[in-house]
């Protein structure tokens, strides 16, 4: 007799149909093993819940390990200038998004931007020497106000802007030299 569905003082098991002996119920014995007390249930749930959470130190270690390189868009515009007047001016309609990695340095950003401008605008020549500028017309070699070499990731963390809103400018090398001489 299986005894899983024996009714108290019943004559047979409702699951298998075997007659019970002297109307004794075996149901209580079988189900006591499968039922948990509230305290046991609570302990089991706490263990399950804890296994799904990670410690804060584990999260930090995972973030450090997962410094993966992402492709991001930055805006790069063209600058023209009149060397005799000593000013540089951003050319309207010549700002385009450039797709680069977050760990890119100034030289790679420059070559990528100049190649894309040369593909889209006939006036741009990728064989001329260009320089990348910040929006304040200073040359991009180091992070602003420091001697740390430029990387896009570090610049973004210093600037606290999203990378799509970061704008750089490309200008021919001769024009920036004239501008710098005029400023002195």
Image (spheres, rainbow, N blue to C red):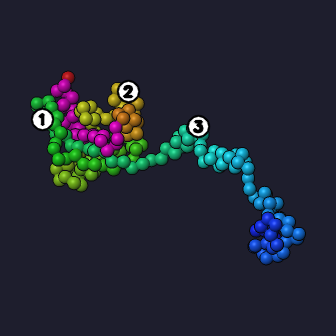
The majority secondary structure of the magenta stretch comes to: helix
Please tell me which of labels 3 and 1 falls first in the chain: 3
Instruction: Indicate which disc, 3 or 2, sits on the residue closer to the N terminus.
Output: 3
In the picture as drawn, the residue positioned furthest to the left comes out as: 85
In front here: 108 or 51? 51
In space, the residues marked 3 and 1 are separated at their CA atoms by 56 Å
- Reply above or below: 182 against 62: above
Dot 3: few (<14), some (14–19), or many (≥20) neighbours within 10 Å?
Answer: few
Residue in the image at 19% along x and 36% along y: 175
| The one of 49 and 134 positioned closer to us in this rendering | 49
For the question of whether residue 151 can be seen, the reply is no
Q: Which mark is residue 146?
A: 2
The percent coordinates of residue 89 (x first, y second) are: 16, 37
Which stretch did the figure color magenta?
161-183
**76 on left or right of 102:** left
Residue drawn at (83%, 64%) of the image:
26
With 130 as the anchor, is 82 left or right in this view? Answer: left
Residue 175 on the magenta span: yes
Q: Residue at x 36, y 48 (%)?
A: 72
Q: Secondary structure at mark 1?
A: strand
Instruction: Tell me whether the residue at label 3 lies in contact with that at label 1, contact meaning CB atoms closer than 8 angstroms.
Output: no
Can residue 43 be seen by looking at this rendering? yes
| Helix, strand or loop for disc 3 | helix
* Upstream in sequence: badge 1 or badge 2: 1
**Residue indicated by mark 3:** 57
Instruction: Reply yes or no: does residue 69 show up in magenta.
Output: no
- In what quadrant of the picture does the C terminus appear? top left
Instruction: Give x and y (percent) for residue 100.
Output: 36, 48
């Amino acid at each position: 007799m299986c005894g899983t569905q024996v009714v108290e003082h019943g004559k047979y098991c409702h699951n298998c149909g075997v007659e019970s002996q002297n109307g004794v119920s075996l149901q209580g014995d079988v189900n006591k093993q499968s039922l948990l007390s509230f305290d046991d249930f609570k302990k089991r749930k706490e263990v399950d819940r804890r296994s799904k959470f990670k410690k804060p130190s584990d999260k930090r270690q995972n973030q450090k390990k997962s410094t993966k390189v992402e492709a991001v868009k930055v805006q790069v515009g063209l600058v023209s200038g009149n060397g005799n007047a000593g000013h540089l001016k951003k050319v309207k309609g010549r700002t385009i998004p450039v797709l680069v990695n977050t760990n890119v340095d100034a030289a790679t950003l420059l070559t990528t931007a100049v190649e894309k401008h040369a593909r889209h605008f006939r006036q741009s020549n990728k064989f001329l020497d260009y320089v990348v500028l910040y929006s304040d017309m200073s040359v991009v070699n180091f992070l602003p106000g420091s001697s740390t070499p430029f990387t896009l990731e570090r610049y973004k963390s210093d600037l606290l802007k999203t990378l799509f809103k970061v704008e750089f400018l490309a200008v021919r090398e001769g024009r920036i030299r004239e501008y710098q001489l005029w400023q002195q």
